Amino acid sequence: MSWHHNERVKDGSLRHPADGESWKAFDSRHEDFAKEPRNVRLGLASDGFNPFRTLSSTHSTWPVVLMVYNLPPWMSMKPDYFMLSLLIPGPQSPGNDIDVYLQPLIEELKELWELGVETYDSKENKTFNMRACLLWTINDFPAYAMLSGWSTKGKLACPCCNDETSSIYLKHSHKTVYMDHRRILPMNHPWRHNKRSFNGKTELRSPPQLLDGTTVFHILQGVDNSFGKKQRKAKNGISNWKKRSIFFDLPYWKFNMFRHNLDVMHIEKNIVDSIIGTLLDISGKTKDHAVARFDLKDMGIRKNLQPRDTNDGKRTKLAKACFSMTAAEKTIFCSVLKGAKLPDGSASNIARCVQQTEKKISGYKTHDAHFMLHYLLQVPIKSILPDHVAIALVRLCSFFRRICQKVISIDEVVNLEAEIAETLYQLERIFPPSFFDIMVHLPIHLANEVRLGGPVQYRWMYPVERYMCTLKSYVRNRSRPEGSIAEGYLANECINFCSRYLHEDVQTRFNRVPRNNDDDVQTRFNRVPRNNDECVSDELRTPSLFPSKGCPLGGKMGDLFMLDEKSEIQGHSYILNNCDKIEVYMREHEEAVNDNNPRRTKWEKAKDHSQQFAEWFKTRAMKKDVSGWAKGLARGPNRVAKRFSGYVINGYRFHTRHRDARRKTQNSGVTLEALTPSFATVKDKNPIEAKVTYYGRIVDMFELDYYGQFKVVLFKCEWYTVAKDNFGLSYVYFSKKCYQEEPFVLASQVNQCFYVQDPYVSDKHYVMKTIPRDLFRISDDLESDSPIIYAREPCEPEVIPSLPNDNGEVDLVRNDLRATIIDMAPNMFAKQRGEEDEESEYEYMEDSDSETS
């Protein structure tokens, strides 16, 4: 419980909520609470779900879940450490009345804050007074309104911009949109005065200011909360507040810098829906429809895209926008997503969601949208769309990819905050106003929330949604779903409690081996592999000079084969050059090469050292001053080696290229970052040593046996020449191979990447780097008892495409496509759409008493 205080790395980067400004400010204000690191920091999450398997049912059950942030990352957001504090029964959503159900929980939280509870510490073998506080809530956007009291509908829907929310009501689309992101820019930015590319107005307002908790508390002092279903009333003059949240009953709540989280999971899903629906012009999903064009006319902007009369006066002509695609281009767009093979465990089979003949994508889940936004969409977008459209969308993808890093620096957060403002106003001049619903606006605030609350992995809904799926599985009696969930939860808690007291050799959910486990833990349980995809450790493996990490896939433990002479020499040479314990002999040989060839260039000496060291070391090892392990290493490996087709290491699951060919996933891509001396020419006397990233695919993998003394696993790879395009994306050609005389690499050195094929050049593939699932790098201390964890993707800083230097003027019309003709005159269309404008605006602006999940 004191991990956040005693073991957390404090280097200025954001790794944990304790690194955020909100946590630090809380500790500064409540020093008596912060003195005891075992005091509990809680987060609260709530959302509605249908407990039945029939989607036609509208039943909505609302669990209220508490999670503990004192714990390390591999524990805090896991369901075993969630506390189901409340279960609000259906069939209706509690809506604004959720505060009534939260009253018992708030009373307990007040007691835990003011009095605490006597608690036994098994590690210290004594009791102490444990207190608790609530840091923030986690929820989707409708639930945000229910818990915070701020209405997330209408013209002031943004809870961060509050009363300064910039919104426009589109009277033809009958919706409110949120634009004017130029106000986030510096006051002297030239685009603040650009009328033509935006809404026809200059933007001279300062950025909106966030309201602190004390200000909100004073604003809501006079609010009389009235619960229950009542007649809708006019606004009471207190801004967009619907109620005074019950969380303000907590003595410390008004002093919290950060009280409610915007959920990145739902924001990403809605943005992907809007992008795909608009680019593919999917009926019912696109934001560029006939109604949106009449909104342009009503606003008096983008005259080239406004609806026009045909010659007969009975029909309306709509020009194609710059982001429109032909039928062939839509097919290509879909083919990229359908043909992409993804690494194991990264996402579902997205190809099943792509309907290539209908040119639409549907049925994907939130995590599929997350993966497409981070990795896949940028490839077809940059290949098909004009540069000014592609740059803006690629920057948006890059923003979400970087904001979701498990470790992020403060400087990068500052850069992201500036970049998202530029990206959104770039999108404003390309897409119609109807594109900018509240979900497209909310990313402007995500960087600030990372600064306040730490990485998004601790504050999004993915763990909570998975936990709700578990609760749903407890339902056995459909006439009493909440009772079934309560019984299942209590039974599960009892099992968890008892399993903590079992002997460590008994497999439980707390010591269960993960799917991509890469150590020998599972041999304790004498497990038998269920199939050829399961990781099997070699129990006979002896201690090695090299880290004993990883395990092969399959039940055969590998196939024996005779190693050819060339592979033996190359593999053995690579092992010697990457063994730190023989560095003394390496330097000795380098000095000998320098003494014997003083006039040769550095490049020639480095080449001689690399080629001759193995034979020299074999001779040098014959002397008496060389230890036994060095003699065994110098002798070289046995020609009889063991071959694998799959291997798990570093949290990744690797396959050979041959094994990948018959699978739906892609696990043969590897990337390696190494310090490499770079020679400008053969005669270069001062080579530059720098980190170089290599990309390739695994051709073979085998284990070299040094006659029982050491066993080393090598990957034989094809390496490719890498380049970057104007969008900052790395790509390779599979036909352009390099380093063919150095194909080997230690299995422990590589990380995984995957390749996405270019839609126009079949041999060209874009490189996408991934990180191990559920793994984090919290400490560089390899001696610690913590799980082995990986920090972030091992890659060079991401290159972000710069905005085009076009002075704000871009071509908004695609002239090579025929305009769309609709069978209605513009004046008749406007009259038909305008009959209910006034009534519809009132209905949209008013807030209903209940929210839907």
Image (cartoon, grey):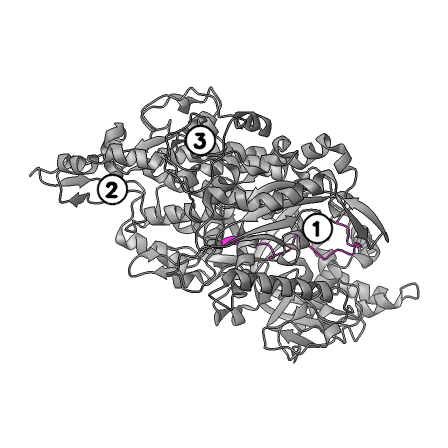
In screen coordinates, is 58 left or right of 484?
A: left
Residue for point 68% across, 64% down: 494
- Disc on the earlier residue, 1 or 2: 1
- Residue 578 position within the rendered picture, expressed as x and y whole percent measured from the top left: 73, 58
Which residue type does callout 3 highlight? Asn
- The residue closer to the viewer here, 798 or 35, is 35
- The residue closer to the viewer here, 453 or 31, is 31
- The residue closer to the viewer here, 788 or 625, is 788
Q: Is residue 334 magenta?
A: no
What residue is disc 1 on?
Answer: 72
Which residue type does callout 1 highlight? Pro
What residue is disc 2 on?
Answer: 320
The residue segment tinted magenta is 765-790
- Other-residue count near label 1 (Cα within 10 Å), few / some / many at <14 / 14–19 / ≥20: some
Q: Which mark is residue 117?
A: none
Residue 372 lies, with reference to residue 246, above or below; the image says below
- Other-residue count near label 3 (Cα within 10 Å), few / some / many at <14 / 14–19 / ≥20: many
